[in-house]
Image (cartoon, rainbow, N blue to C red):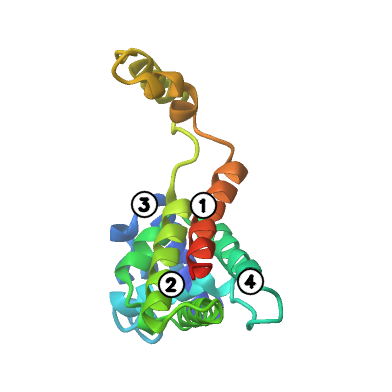
Amino acid sequence: MGKLTAAAIVERALEIGDTEGLDAVTIRRLATDLGVTPMALYWHFKNKEQLLAGMADHLIADFVPKPADERPWLDQLRDLVQGLIRTLRRNPCAKNVLEQVDQVEVPNFLAVWDLTLGLARSAGFSIEESCLISKYILQSVIAIADAPVHPKTPERSRTKKLALQSLPVEKYPHLVEMAGPMANGMDPDFYDSFGVDLLLAGIQALSSRP
């Protein structure tokens, strides 16, 4: 192969993480897959922590937010949240990567974080509130992007639906009524848009407090 790059390493690491889990991502495994010696990888990443930071930075690289503009803060925040969800959903291992990495070591994450804080401040929130908003937004984005919108197999869907429908209707009327969508999953676009609306509606309502 040609000259080994950091991008090639993290792209292969993400492929392994998506299909086999992060435990399978090791320097030795990457070196074997890329046809190089482990020392060639250590030139770019000295340890697993640096590799995870590189993976996280690469995950968010396709979504580097633009600087704040003249649009209302809520519109900008919506674009940021939706863009992050789309970006993270492309990689099943994204949640685990972001949970394990030292976020201060991820430049692209810092850019997203800083913009989120700035938008919260422009909406009139205090410093403490803005910090909490940025944390809740990140946690919500990860949860929405990581959630299995559709059941894994039709058989599991049928089993779950039957289990819910067989519950005592007098005790669990709503679970029985909604067994279908609860078991069968939902349209991904609706799932994402509703989650974003729910999150931002709460932030907007708080910004309007007297």
Nearer the observer: mark 1 or 2; the answer is 1
Q: Is residue 209 left or right of residue 190?
A: left
Dot 1, how many residues are within 10 Å of its Cα: few (below 14), some (14-19), or many (20+)? few
- The label on residue 134 is 2
Q: Dot 1 corresponds to which residue?
A: 198
Q: Residue placed at 42% from the left, 21% from the top?
A: 155
Q: CA distance from mark 2 to mark 3?
A: 30 Å
Q: Dot 3 corresponds to which residue?
A: 20
As drawn, which residue projects farthest toward the bottom?
43
Q: Dot 4 corresponds to which residue?
A: 76
Q: Amino acid at mark 2?
A: Ser
Q: Residue placed at 32% from the left, 21% from the top?
A: 172
Q: Is residue 32 visible?
A: no
Circles 3, 4 touching at the beta carbon (< 8 Å): no
Q: CA distance from mark 1 to mark 3?
A: 33 Å
Tell me the element at label 1.
helix
